Image (spheres, coloured by chain):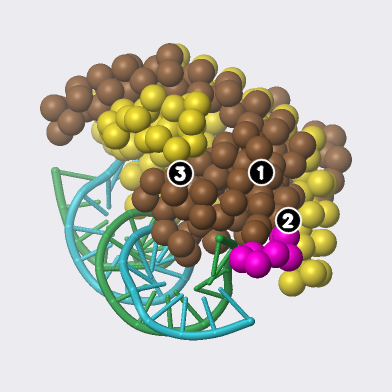
Chain colours: A brown, B yellow, C green, D cyan
Amino acid sequence: MSRSTSDVPSQVAQCPTCTVREVLDRVGGKWSIGVLVEAVRGPVRFTELERIITGISRRMLTLTLRNLERDGLLTRTVHPTVPPKVEYVATPMALELHDALFTLTSWAERHRDDIATARTVYDAAH
Amino acid sequence: MSRSTSDVPSQVAQCPTCTVREVLDRVGGKWSIGVLVEAVRGPVRFTELERIITGISRRMLTLTLRNLERDGLLTRTVHPTVPPKVEYVATPMALELHDALFTLTSWAERHRDDIATARTVYDAAH
DNA sequence: CGGCATCCAAACGGATACTG
DNA sequence: CAGTATCCGTTTGGATGCCG
């Protein structure tokens, strides 16, 4: 792993660091993961999400959905009925991302206690 | 797994979603990954980081270092010399995290073009 | 039902002067 | 060298009214 350039397929993000940041810029938001996870389970409606994801505001849900849709992680389907019905579902790409996040979940679970301890120790010393 | 009930009101993560968020709360910051990556490569000094990580301010470097240290991801070593010398190095736990992030990197590389395309399409339609 | 628009508060982050 | 303190602009996010 060199600091200098290796073979790059496209233009931006040569270094792994930047690549990771790309992901983080998408799902690093406070609510993105939560919305994503629900959409992976199957089609889900706006109001459903609002109920499931505790604490999210109407505005943030909208913003999160729009961003995920824009990045091609979510598909938005409008049913022209009365009352209106809109369903969101994860794309194949999002499913893969969901699986990739499992590695992180695993890490977090393994080290949850270590981190808690580290914090306690640090806070005690400062 | 029911959508309807929120069986656990606790602050601690039971669901995978919350677990992922725990990680993101640590390394989701603008500079965390960059600093982490450098510290994984070996001991690195404050000024070195300031030079390597383009665009970071002195304040943000300090804050990022303190947070990573607090979470037990970085070890800070002070050499009582003149002039002072402080070295930061990643802990074993951080090394594992670094590896786990590779899965995400891989995803981002595979789908970089897809995302770019999705954005173009979305922006054109709105 | 599914939003968008508006207003406001808090968190995040940059620049830089100062210090042991 | 390795920070801390301060100031200030930007971004993020919550609450809510309105509307098709």
- Residue B81, given in percent of the width and then of the height, sits at 26, 28
Name which residue type carries label 2.
Thr
Give yes or no for contact between labels 2 and 3 (Cβ–Cβ under 8 Å): no
Name which residue type carries label 1.
Pro
**Image mark for residue A43:** 1
Q: Mark 2 vs mark 3: same chain? A: yes
Give yes or no for contact between labels 2 and 1 (Cβ–Cβ under 8 Å): yes
Residue nearest the viewer, comparing A103 with A65: A65
Question: In which image quadrant can residue B121 be found?
Answer: bottom right
Q: CA distance from mark 3 to mark 1?
A: 13 Å
The residue that mark 3 highlights is A52
**Measuring 73% from the left and 65% from the top, which residue is drawn there?**
A80
Is residue A17 shown above or below A111? below
Q: Earlier in the sequence, mark 3 or mark 1?
A: 1
> Do we see residue B102 in this rendering?
yes
Which quadrant: the N terminus of chain A?
Answer: top right
Give SS at disc 3: helix
Q: Earlier in the sequence, mark 2 or mark 3?
A: 3
Q: Main secondary structure of the magenta part?
A: loop
The residue that mark 2 highlights is A77
